[in-house]
Image (cartoon, rainbow, N blue to C red):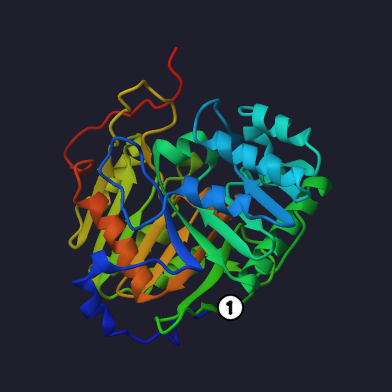
Amino acid sequence: MRILNKIKPIALFIMLVGIVTAQLPYNDFEIVESIPVETTLDNPDIRNTFDVWLEMISDAQSTIDIEQFYISNEKGEALEPIIRAIEKAADRGVEVRIIAEEKMSKTYPETLELLSKQKNIQVRLINVFGSKGGVQHSKYFIVDRRQVFIGSQNFDWRALDHIHELGLRIRHIPYAKKMTKLFELDWKQCHAKRMLPQSPSRESEWMTVKENEREPVRFFATASPEGNIPSGFVLDLPALIELIDNARKRVYIQLLSYSPSVRGGAYFADLDDALRRAAARGADVRLICSDWCQKPYEMPCLKELAQLPNLNVKLSTIPEWSGDYIPFSRVEHCKMMIIDDSLSWIGSSNWQRDYFYDSRNIAVVVRNTRINTMLSRIFLKSWDGPYSWKVDPEQEYKPKYYGEKN
């Protein structure tokens, strides 16, 4: 697979660097963020997830297809108007289908059960990836087969106000058709209770969004796991590695977690080796992960990377909310990578082996200097901000507890 052989450097980036604050999002290819309240991470020119979700769902005319890791509402919180909007859409005749991971439905059953009782709403649980030790981890929804939201955001009230998230709203019918094809596959697999063999595309299928005289946005779809990807998508992991291997200037990565360690003591070297190669070539490699990574099987790998020339590693600690402790929140959860001046990756995968080999995840690879510049600004705001701190290879770290408190 060669995804970069037709890409040429774009000199316009040099001028754009000095005027990033003047950048405006594309109407049909829009970056969307979730900002933890009481932090300084907000970008005023980038819309927040709540507003975009509510607009998309409220505008639905015929269909809404939702595939999520889980759905967790809390009375009085930000997701509740979204859930009400889904119910109102169903009331006006919109056909709503929802897929959620069966394992997580046992933890958060209430909202799924409520929605399943509504007219014009069907809910199915999927467990087919569990046979490989994986889960349905993608996060997306499709409205009217015309527009798609994808990103790191779970359908969780915390993801709207208490977690740092990044996503895309894409209005593009050919892409929406591809995503519908993926949804239909998982909808069938819910019923079949087994994985139905699929073959991905061998070459990336570039799509284009054009708006006025601006530089077009070119992008293609990736997904995982291997053996269960319909045509129209390429495998996510090889696409990531090829992007990194073609980097010459910079590789900026922002994730919840990064770990080459695998159960049983094995080592998942694919991405780790690619980052080391990029740094050895002289590229500026920077990695931000959440402070949830302070685990015995994750920190040694991050410490090793932090000792290499041209490779810097930071963790992010989002302060607790002043109102009360909220479990599984106040965390860095974006999943993005920025390559050089015009290439970017935005997806749902944490960078651990099972997310690529065992679980359902999705992403897009984007070629556009404006998008690259805006994502770089988001990344650098975290990198240079008050919440990130450099990993010290000589220091001992203790795991952070972020679950329910007794």
Compare residues 72 and 47 and report the one nearer the observer: 47
Image location (x, y in percent) of residue 55: 55, 52
Q: Check the image and report above or below for 137 versus 243.
A: above
Image location (x, y in percent) of residue 213: 41, 84
Q: Answer with the quarter of the image where residue 83 lies.
A: top right
- Left or right: 221 as drawn, with respect to 280: right
Is residue 282 in view?
Answer: no
Is residue 372 in view?
Answer: yes
Q: Quadrant of the N terminus?
A: bottom right
Q: Check the image and report above or below for 50 versus 357.
A: above
- Left or right: 206 as drawn, with respect to 297: right
Compare residues 318 and 253 and report the one nearer the observer: 318
Image location (x, y in percent) of residue 220: 54, 72
**Tag 1: residue type?**
Glu
Q: Answer with the quarter of the image where residue 7 lies.
A: bottom left
Image point (62%, 34%), residue name: 104
Compare residues 106 and 193 and report the one nearer the observer: 106
Image location (x, y in percent) of residue 225: 61, 57
Q: Check the image and report above or below for 366 versus 289.
A: below
- Where disc 1 sits, the SS reads loop
Q: Quadrant of the C terminus?
A: top left
Q: Answer with the quarter of the image where residue 18 lies.
A: bottom left
Q: Characterize the local packing of mark 1: few (<14), some (14-19) or many (20 or more) Cα atoms within 10 angstroms.
A: some
Q: Which residue is mark 1?
A: 205
